[in-house]
Amino acid sequence: MNLDFSRVALMVFFFVIPVIGIVLGQNSPALRGRIPLVVAFIAGIIPIIALYVPKSFLSGPEGMSTRLDQWLIIVAGFALLLGVVNVLQNSSRKIARKDSGWIYSAVLLTGLLLTGSFGIWGAISGHGIGFMPDGSSTPFKWVEDRIFQPLQSTIFSLLAFFMASAAFRAFRARNTEATILLVAAGLVMAGRVPLLEFLAAPFPPLQPAAAAGSRFLGGLTEWIMDNPNGAAQSGIIIGAALGAASMAMRIILGIERGYLGLGAGEQT
Amino acid sequence: MNRFFEWLLNLDRRWIYLLVAVSLITPIVVPIGLPVSTTASTRRAFEVIEALQPGDVVWLSFDYGPSSTPENDPMADAFLRQCFLKKLRVIVTALYPLGGLGLANNSLARVTAEFPGLRYGEDYVNLGYKDGAAAVMRSLGESISKAFPADQSGRPLADLPMMRGVQNIHQVKLVFTAATNLIGEYWITQAHAQFGTPVVIGPTAVSAPKYYAYLNAGQLAGMLGGMKGAAEYEKLLREKYPQLDQYYAQTRRFTATKGMDGQTVLHTIILIFIVLGNVAYLRTRGRRRREPA
């Protein structure tokens, strides 16, 4: 086994220290809350230091920061598993209690278990989740192509109906701000499609004028998207990035502790 | 007249739904063939891909699910066609958990069938799905094989001739992400900002406004905004490659150019609804004010 510094350090930080914390935390609720703070601090500070300290044990191909990135992919996989467990628990409980809408939970569980078992079968049999050796679909792909994709597309396409109805009923020029929004939205909606050409289609002599009008509307739309929209979006993105950075600093420094989910008596 | 506006304001929404359904289905069944004008962001995207040299490696990421296939599928298909016509080598991945890989498989199956001379492993590879989008992108800067040790069918990357000269994303000339949510933004903040790889994005129309900020800042090489962007891209492709013009004119498959007909009719209907709704609102509001309490 290759015992280089970065590997050993990560083992100490993310295995030895948490295990010690769990063992000692059995009798000390306060310690139980403190160890995760240490782990979070180390996990947060390593990638930051790696940006400024060009040492191979930190930022090299086998460095601590690089290894943490690999671990993150694995942890993300476990987050999916956590979601599956959560769905199983909630749906089973609902079915057992015969709560209102329990039948939907039964359908959800059936779909989850059936699709999941097809996926696991694909992994065990070596066929994967794509095509069989003869070019036909695997059971997983059949479910995905014939059930999952049409269902998701259908649900999303309902949006067109709700949008049209909502636009008719709620998009009103009630005050100055709403009127500005209404005019801008109308211009963008008209400018994103060849609306004038469509309206002028039954009248061929009007086509050149419609084409010129469409070009003007298209240019105006691009101006709206590039300038007022682009400026506002930049502000939102910069604001969100600053917020995320400050939240990250609060977590690294242990000021923000909500993610710990501590119970009574465990506050540090 | 006032009775008409009252009737309009109380119109059963099911009539609106029926009108929307008819206005969407009719142009799909009987295409109108409305003209498509191109915008600067799509032209930039097309030109940056066109400027690549045969043999260059590009990355296509399927970062969307079935809910946005009418917008994103035509983009991905058209990008693959341009790459294969230009003899670019394509790495395909899917970072969106809800069906991204299935859509990647379907798109590859559709487009590679049009190019019989293509060889898997030499002209294109499918590395499959990996969870943890941002973390995956970060690790691509160091090593592709660490994030994707094998392709979708389990073949180690070392067995794929195309991947032998591609160690990390620094050797990739361009990333194209057809994206429906945050993953598109991750490509900008991770692949472009940290490794300098040019990124072209194909977002849904709903999320496109956000990307204008990145486009203006020079952090995006180009953008195909929604179905309109996809239709523009198809138009540019047809103009550059006449063999594709024939395909797009004759195919019975759904294309963004066909979709734009339906979108145009629907936008027209919605705009008419908005105007009628506001006229009715303003007329009845004035009358309500005049009426004694």
Image (cartoon, coloured by chain):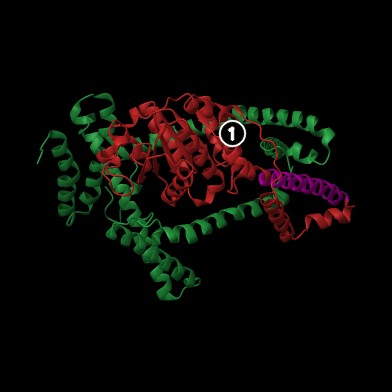
Chain colours: A green, B red
| Residue type, numbered disc 1 | Arg
Q: Residue A51, percent across and down?
A: 29, 27
Q: Residue at x 22, y 31 (%)?
A: A61
Q: Quadrant of the C terminus of chain B?
A: bottom right
Give me the chain letter of mark 1.
B
- Magenta span: B262-290
* B49 on left or right of A117: right
Q: Residue at x 55, y 37 (%)?
A: B208
* A177 on left or right of B225: right
Which residue is denoted by mark 1 in the rendering? Answer: B238
A102, above or below A76, in the image: below
Q: Residue B96, percent across and down?
A: 42, 47
Q: Residue B219, percent across and down?
A: 46, 27
A186, above or below A222, in the image: below
> Residue B265 magenta-drawn?
yes
Q: Residue A219, percent across and down?
A: 67, 27
Disc 1 secondary structure class: helix
B214, above or below B202, in the image: above
Image quadrant assignment for residue A264: bottom left
Q: Main secondary structure of the magenta part?
A: helix
